[in-house]
């Protein structure tokens, strides 16, 4: 994911605290975002965004394996739930 909207509805929904308020909009830290792979069925930020402003960063394509590795690094005490 890349940037979020300016309303901030997504910030509290992120289980990784990857979203923070930027200068003119909320931003997503790509090192903390694994698209909720292993945790939830869909990204919580996109499910609450009233404007569909949250979009993937085309310059940062990550494989499922890379996202899973990020999940394990962020949540070493949790077992991923994969569907």
Image (cartoon, helix red, strand yellow):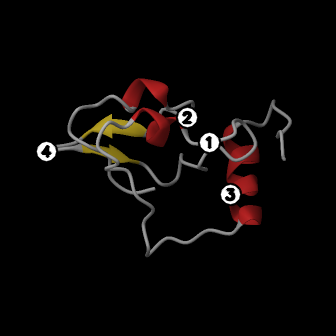
| Of callouts 3 and 1, the N-terminal one | 1
At which x and y percent is residue 27?
A: 32, 46
Left or right: 41 with respect to 58? right
Q: Residue at x 55, y 72 (%)?
A: 61
Q: Which secondary structure, mark 2?
A: loop
| Of callouts 3 and 4, the N-terminal one | 4
Left or right: 7 with respect to 74? left
At which x and y percent is residue 80?
A: 82, 40
Residue extending farthest to the left is: 24
Q: Which mark is residue 31?
A: none
Residues under numbered marks 2 and 3 in contact, where contact means CB atoms less than 8 Å apart: no
Residue extending farthest to the top is: 12
Q: Which residue is mark 4?
A: 24
Q: Which residue is mark 3?
A: 67
Q: Give the CA distance from mark 1 to mark 2.
A: 14 Å
At which x and y percent is residue 17?
A: 48, 32
- In this rendered view, identify the residue nearer to me: 31 or 28: 28
Q: Which residue is mark 2?
A: 16
Q: Residue at x 32, y 36 (%)?
A: 50
Q: Which one is in front in this view, the residue at disc 1 or the one at disc 2?
A: 1
| Of callouts 4 and 1, the N-terminal one | 4
- In this rendered view, identify the residue nearer to me: 78 or 57: 57
Q: Give the CA distance from mark 4 to mark 1.
A: 26 Å
Residues under numbered marks 4 and 1 in contact, where contact means CB atoms less than 8 Å apart: no
Q: Which secondary structure, mark 3?
A: helix
Q: Quadrant of residue 22?
A: top left
Q: Residue at x 81, y 30 (%)?
A: 77
Q: Residue at x 52, y 53 (%)?
A: 31
Q: Which residue is mark 1?
A: 42
Q: Give the CA distance from mark 3 to mark 4.
A: 28 Å
């Amino acid at each position: 994911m890349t940037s979020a909207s300016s309303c901030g509805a997504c910030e509290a929904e992120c289980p990784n605290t990857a979203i923070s308020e930027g200068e003119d909009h909320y931003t997503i830290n790509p090192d903390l975002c694994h698209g909720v792979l292993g945790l939830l069925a869909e990204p919580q930020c996109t499910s609450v965004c009233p404007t569909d402003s949250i979009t993937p960063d085309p310059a940062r394509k990550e494989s499922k394996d890379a996202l899973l590795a990020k999940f394990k690094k962020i949540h070493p005490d949790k077992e991923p739930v994969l569907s």
